[in-house]
Amino acid sequence: MQVTIDITRQQVEKIFGLDEYWCQCVAWSTTGTQKSQKAYIRIAYLRKNFEEEPQGKEVTLDQEVLLRCHPPEGVPQAEVEWQRNEDVINPGSDLNFFMTTDHSLVIKKARLGDTGNYTCVAKNIVARRKSNSATVLVYVNGGWSTWTTWSSCSAVCGRGWQKRSRSCTNPTPLNGGTSCEGQNVQKSACVATCPVDGGWSEWSKWSACGADCSMWRSRECSQPSPGTRGKDCQGLDLQSLNCTSEQCPQTVSGAEDVALYVGMVVVALCLTLLLIVVVLVYRRKKEDLDSDVADSSILTTGFQPMGIKPSKPENSHLLTIQPDLTTTTTSYQGTLRSRPHTTGKFSMTNGPLLDPLPNGSHTLHNGNSDPAEFVSRLSTQTYFKTLPRDVANTSYGTFNFLGGRLTIPSTGISLLIPPEAIPRGKIYEIYLTVQRKEDLRLPLAGCQTLLSPVVSCGPPGVVLSRPVILSMDHCSDACLDNWAVRLKKQNYEGTWEDVLLMGEELVSEPYYCQLEAETCRLFTEHLGTLALVGESLHMGAAKRLRLVLFSDAYCSTLEYNIRVYCMDDTQDVFKEVMQMERQLGGRLIDEPHILLFKDSYHNLRLSIHDMPQAHWRSKLLAGYQEIPFYHIWNGSQRYLHCTFTLERLSLSTCELTCQLCVWQVEGEGQSFSLDFNIAKDTRAVDAEFLLMDISATALAGPSAFQIPYLIRQKICSSLDAPCPNGADWRMLAQRLKLERHMSFFASKASPTSLILDLWEAQHFHSGNINQLATVMADIGKQEAMIFLVSDGEC
């Protein structure tokens, strides 16, 4: 028999309430009663909220990961499973996963594939609950690869540099892992073994005459043997010669030999006569081309006379200085033509001008001619067609043996022509100009960078008796331990050649350089187009950059622009930017700052901060602007600039305060604190920062020097002769702090004259002649008294 009963939940709750209850089946009869086991009835449920949900983590590769999960309360107790990206995780099939008794998930070693969203899932007969997803990010920190082998030395011969590199690929940073710390490139100085060209040894003795009536001798390419990519010896290593009839075992004589010898003598006589005719024709043509100057007073054309007044009684010793100058104040400008039938003339045929003017004429100009006419005339000659026709950056003049000076104003570029540099009897028209980088491309490779303006002086090929001094700015940190600085010169074919390596100058070379903190003084007897190129030896090498800020002089709109120029710290580039901003109507809004820009491969960043947000805002989308490293280090542009466009919220806003920062990544920086009124143009472009040089561009004769010519000669004759107690030119060099160049001075016929030339080049504008007189007095030379004579007395 089977008995069933239907009981609803409402009936039970009405009697027993919400507490747990049980049911029992009771069967009875006349024989007795029997009870079944109690059946407990509970209400099944599963709450919505997890007691503890898993939290996202960022872990490194192979790190252990623990994700905790406490499921919601429920009856019956919920079962837990884990999902990764909605896929169920089975710890049985993937042993890298392990589930603890408290339902937490353990990842034993995090793998890149374990990155994902992890979800804890709880379920029972009532419901299924999911926790919030926890993101596990397995990242990889970058690691350096091994260094590559060192590259070959950049120099073919002598000192250069080599580098090696590594990459951040062992492993490559992933999922936000940190990049490698440190440099990816290392540089090191190196010395390349110079190529050795082979040289022939002496010829061996002639061998005995053979049966074929010939003998031979040999030599070897062993003095020295070619090495390190050097050239092999050119020519024959074996030479043979016919034997004479006496030495030949089989003598052969006859009329044929006599005819051969007679023919050779006739040919030799004909060649001799032909050579004599060619020489005579050449001399005749050369004499026709000679141009003479009939009037000897032309030697002083364009020069101011040096008059000598009678000395005062107390300076009677000066009367012994007799000038040999008899020039007058008249000047001459015109054409000098050859006059072949006049005697006692001054010949111009050995002059240095490369291309003679038509019809054998030479035009002589004083310093007051039209510069545009000079540049136009100069550019018609073959070699000078490539020169820039920039009158504002060109200076020229006509000079004789008294010398002079050429200056390009506000550029720091000048050419000093000392007395006696031009041979007596010669008159040269000399020019000085600064090239633009855009006009002239220098071949720069590797870590090379241009350190100076490209300067042309000439004409090339002029004959000089002693060195002239070319002064120009440079932008290096002047530490030769950081640089390999080379002087480059452009040859007639237009290619650039290395003519000097700083620190390794030889007194026998035609170039010698003194590198000062900001200026280079170059001694040379060969004019041409020159520039300084630096090659950094390590990352400590730095260029000086000049940072200059400009803005619009007048602003009638809401937008306002601030232009930041980053340029080489040389006066010629600064002058060019100032002239350009004057044309644009710009205004200088702060003093220039100097920044040391290192060869670290890091870019230059510029940003603007601390603007009053209630009145101004920047229209720059990014946090900063950036100039790439290579655009600054070896770019072809003379200057670079960034523009910050600001917007004022009202036209009535005129006061602007902000902080403008310029810095090299992981390097030095500069900050401009700006506080000015944009409506007031109080600091124009031509303010005191430009410091325009209004001095004459060309000075000829005595006016170009602080030390009078005759006094200079007396000082040289006094100090050039060696003195036992050292009171000679060597002590003068020491007192003027020029002892580093002693060997160079000693190699010249008059060391004192070179020292005085260098002093004139350094102190033309700021030199105090009395200080030089004091140095002479300390040496113990009575010639120091000469400096105290006024200009009127000299």
Image (cartoon, rainbow, N blue to C red):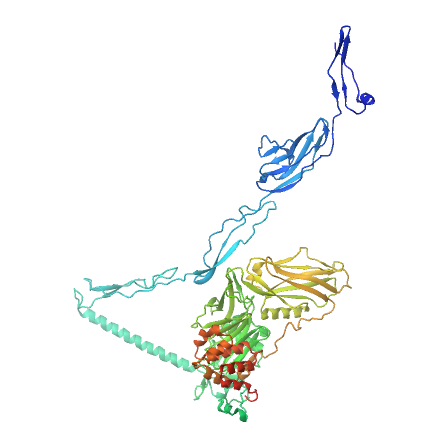
* Quadrant hosting residue 410: bottom right
- Where residue 79 sits, quadrant-wise, is top right
Left-right relation of 111 to 358: right
The residue at the point 50 percent across, 61 percent down is 537
The quarter of the displayed image where residue 263 is located: bottom left
User: In x, y percent, where is residue 625?
Assistant: 64, 58
**Screen quadrant of the C terminus:** bottom right
Give above or below for 9 relative to 458: above
- Report x, y in % for residue 560: 71, 63
The furthest residue to the bottom: 313
Is residue 599 at least partly visible in the picture?
yes
Tell me the residue at 71%/71% (across/down).
682
Label total for image:
0
Point out residue 7 in the picture as x, y percentages from the top left corner.
Answer: 79, 18
In depth, the one of 678 and 104 nearer the eye is 104
Furthest residue toward right: 14
Above or below, comparing residue 51 to residue 539 in the picture: above
Q: Is 308 or 673 nearer to us in this picture?
A: 673
Percent position (x, y) of residue 456?
A: 52, 72
Q: Foreground residue, 715 or 519?
A: 715
Report if residue 425 is visible in the image: no
Question: At x 30% / y 75%, what residue is drawn?
Answer: 271
Q: Quadrant of the N terminus?
A: top right
- In the picture, measured across the screen, residue 399 lies left or right of residue 75, that is left
